[in-house]
Image (spheres, rainbow, N blue to C red):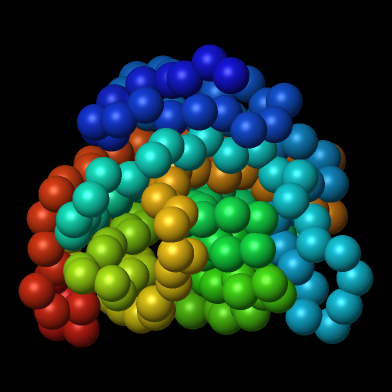
Amino acid sequence: MTSTHVPGVPFALEPVGDVRWRIEDHAVAATAAPGTDVFADPAGGPPVLSAARLVGELPDGDFQLRCRVTVDVRSTFDAGVLLLWFDDAHWAKLCLEGAPGGQPMVVSVVNRTVSDDANAVDVAGRSTWLRVSRTGSVFAFHASVDGTTWRLVRLFALDVPGVRPRIGFEVQSPTGDGCEVAFSEIEFAAATLTDPRNGS
């Protein structure tokens, strides 16, 4: 498996899946394959783990990973995702996703054997800022319209003893024929988020 270095991320990322990840203009982009997703339906059925991802092992300590996500939404649930990954049964994702009716939304999912699914806010246009943070043992998902003021989407704990989490990017098109996704202005910082609720 060939590792990739993405501008703004200080550790190597490894691709999973057959999608080709493109480094262009200080961004990483990919075309989601048709019918792909990362989701374990709480109503039943086997988990779907077919979406392409590009992830690397997180260093120890607090961190923040932020970027601007742009999705050419063509079908319901087309999405660009910041993905936190422990194993096939334990992961979390923060998405810019096409909702039913075509409106892009910020959506989050935390999977502990099965997935939950939570819609946050509508997004005007095809782009928004997303951020994943860890402070101690707590993770935070945030979204922003300008990359400066951040709205809390989700605060949660997730851990698998003995497993070091991985983080990175995912592209999906569960009901469609694929979509274009770009992650730009990527920044990873070993920085502590002092207050997840004050907009910082």
- 5 and 127: which one is in front? 5
Q: Is residue 4 above or below residue 93?
A: above
Instruction: Please state the horizontal and vertical placement of residue 85, each as a whole percent of the image.
Output: 51, 53
Q: Is residue 102 left or right of residue 170?
A: right
Residue drawn at point x = 70 percent, y = 44 percent: 51
Q: Is residue 131 left or right of residue 56?
A: left
Instruction: Please state the horizontal and vertical placement of residue 174, each as a whole percent of the image.
Output: 79, 53
- 104 and 178: which one is in front? 178
Residue drawn at point x = 16 percent, y = 46 percent: 189
Q: Quadrant of residue 110?
A: bottom right
Q: Is residue 117 above or below residue 21?
A: below
Instruction: Please state the horizontal and vertical placement of residue 64, each as a whole percent of the image.
Output: 23, 55
- 68 and 109: which one is in front? 109
Instruction: Please state the horizontal and vertical placement of residue 171, each as a whole percent of the image.
Output: 61, 43
Q: Is residue 27 above or below residue 170?
A: above
Residue drawn at point x = 61 percent, y = 74 percent: 112
Quadrant containing the N terminus is: top right
> What count of labels does the image hold?
0
Residue 114 visible from this viewpoint:
yes
Quadrant containing the C terminus is: bottom left
Residue drawn at point x = 49 percent, y = 79 percent: 120
- 138 and 164: which one is in front? 164
